[in-house]
Image (tube, rainbow, N blue to C red):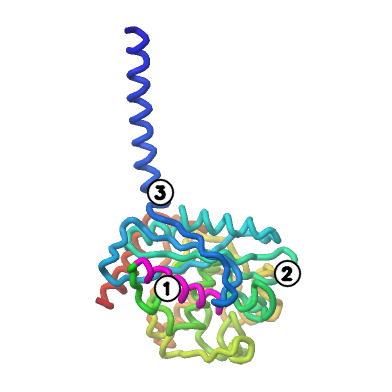
Amino acid sequence: MKKKKLIMPAFFLCIFLFAAFFAVYRYVGVGGKIVKIEANRDKGFYTEYYLFIPDTLNAADQTFLLVECNNTGSVDDNHKTHRDAAYNTIRFGQSNRIARKLGVPLIIPCFDRPETDWQMYTHALDRDTLLCENGALSRIDRQLNSMIDDARTVLRAKNIYVQDKVLLNGFSASGSFANRFAALYPERVAAVAAGGLNSMAILPMDSLQGHELIYPVGISDIKQIADLTFQLSAFANVPQYYYMGAEDENDSLPFDDAYSNLERKIITEVLGEDMKVRWENCQKLYESQSIEAQFHTFQGIGHETSTEIDKDITSFFAQVMDEYK
């Protein structure tokens, strides 16, 4: 009997701890089903992507597809490093939390950010990335479009129907990717949210103060380097939400993988070298072009997100989704 008295409380304690762990896991963890879609060159994408279907999704309603580029945070020639980072992002990242709150599916690609070709900051969709026309990283902007189309087909087979336009989200490098992708393909974007984007959004202009605004500073030469025509009116009508932490000092401007010497010179002369000055000037320039964009600065926040920011973005996307009903 004594032995049972010792065993039984321990048994119930284990049950309690398991239940508590599961509750926390469901709150901060995956909260749905993750499917890996293998690369398919015939369909236009040369690397795999992950598709997340949250438990909160109501298949009876037409919904939206949420999209974020993977962001490993470092260069590596080992593809597994980037694939694992993408998996962790779709399982535990900000977009997972937003997808569960909104009840929408989410995709994240597994694009490499190579060490050998370190100048290609793929996860930020920089100039060198757009110029890549060969290999597995050839025009990953087009590959992402193909992944979006494929994900729509995969979801349709599960009787889940999504709108033609997607929701874009990202932070840091993937925030720059989201902002730049929206400028390149505004006709595909229902709304975009991006944070920690170096205090600088792509400028929807050809020139400023006597400087040609080459991509990714601006859009003057995207026809030449990407065979795309900038659609100002379409971009202006995309609801956009950009944010920075007031204490964010993570400035990629001095780094050669993020910007060339020419790009750095243009940015410094038309926007300023100081991050806070650049941020203010970006807002003014977007307003001058009548872009439907909100700019937010969160006090007490560095290069990070927060519960408050998550709630804000979720509310922003929810409002956009309501307008489609």
* Sequence-wise first label, 1 or 3: 3
Q: CA distance from mark 1 to mark 2?
A: 33 Å
Disc number at residue 28?
A: 3
The magenta region covers 142-158
Amino acid type assigned to the residue bearing label 3 in the image: Val
Judge by depth and name the residue closer to the eye, 296 or 166: 166
In the image, farthest residue toward the right:
116
Q: Residues within 10 Å of mark 3 (few under 14, many from 20)?
A: some
7 on left or right of 69: left
> Is label 1 in a helix, a strand or a loop?
helix
Q: Can you identify the residue that label 1 sits on? A: 153
272 on left or right of 293: right
Q: Residue placed at 41% from the left, 73% from the top?
A: 152
Judge by depth and name the residue closer to the eye, 197 or 226: 226
- Front label number (1 vs 2): 1
Cβ–Cβ below 8 Å for labels 3 and 2? no
Query: Which percent across, then down, holds residue 160?
Result: 34, 68
Amino acid type assigned to the residue bearing label 1 in the image: Thr
Query: Which percent across, then down, holds residue 194?
Result: 46, 69
- Front label number (1 vs 3): 1
**Which corner quadrant holds the C terminus?**
bottom left
Q: Quadrant of residue 300?
A: bottom left
* Sequence-wise first label, 1 or 2: 2
Q: Residue placed at 40% from the left, 72% from the top?
A: 167
